[in-house]
Amino acid sequence: MTIGLRARTSFQVWGLVLFLCAGAGTIRAQQVDSAAMLQKIDAAVKARVDGIAAYTVTEHYAVFRSKDEVHPVAEMTVKTTYKQETGKSYSIVSETGSTVVRNLVLHAILDNEQHVNEPGIREGAWVTTANYEMKMKPGGILKVDGRDCIALVLTPRRKEPYLLEGTLWVDAKDGKIVQIEGKATKSSSVFTGATQLARQYSNVEGFAQATHARAQSDSFLFGQTVVKIDYQDYQIQLQPVP
């Protein structure tokens, strides 16, 4: 997700208990086969793409400015519909706050997300080895949100606003995305800096689906702008089993 042209917009471990409770504490474990892990990541993405015929989800957007992430200047709730053959469409359920921010930020995000998810374009945004060079970080298996994960350094194979340079955490067992964060390699506008993005995922019907996201960008018009997104109430239609 990128805010587009219209937006112009660990500490020392004192004991075993604290170690185990850390949000992403390192667990020393057996060596993980890098090539096999990359294959799992690609396979998990393909399984999701092939397995989901359609889904709906309720997305709540909140925009914050001037380093105040408590009081949103604009909010929007939308019903998102995804269909494998056509991509995403949106229906606005409610919107409040600054009309200017809603139009130049939130509507721009929806337009961009719709474009990126069009068939023929979305393939270039998938988190796969076709789009990214992935190198496993040292340290073995990590605990992230209670799940055994592998951390990988992401380096995009080309510069695009929807590709991130940063870190990917995947489930150590099946390669499904658990978390991703980084900076877009290219700004979508000459008026804004590259977007910083963090997104968390959960298993829904056996597939990795986004549950929360935070995007930050800077512009000479709006200054620092933060958008937080919560995803709820997934309804997934699976492809029929042959």
Image: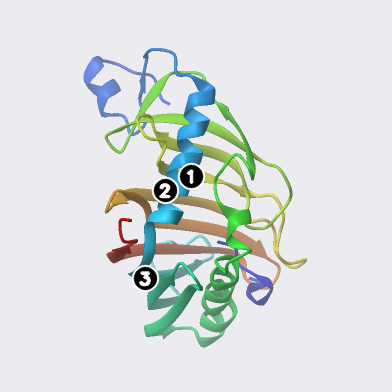
Residue type highlighted by circle 1: Ile
Query: Furthest residue to the right?
Result: 190
**Pointer 1: what residue?**
180
Between discs 1 and 3, the one toward the N terminus = 3
**Pointer 2: what residue?**
47
So how many labels did they put on this image?
Answer: 3
Q: Is residue 210 left or right of residue 134?
A: left
Residue occupying image coordinates x 41% and y 63%: 229
Crowding at mark 2 (Cα within 10 Å: few <14, some 14-19, many 20+): some
Residue type highlighted by circle 3: His
- Distance (Cα) linking label 2 and label 1: 19 Å
Question: Which circle marks residue 60 in the picture?
Answer: 3
Which secondary structure lies at badge 1?
Answer: strand
**126 above or below 233?**
above
Which of the two discs, 2 and 1, sits closer to the camera? Answer: 2
- Distance (Cα) linking label 1 and label 3: 19 Å
As rendered, which of 136 and 226 lies closer to the eye? Answer: 136
Residue type highlighted by circle 2: Ala
Horizontal and vertical percent position of residue 9:
63, 70
Horizontal and vertical percent position of residue 37:
47, 28
Horizontal and vertical percent position of residue 42:
51, 40
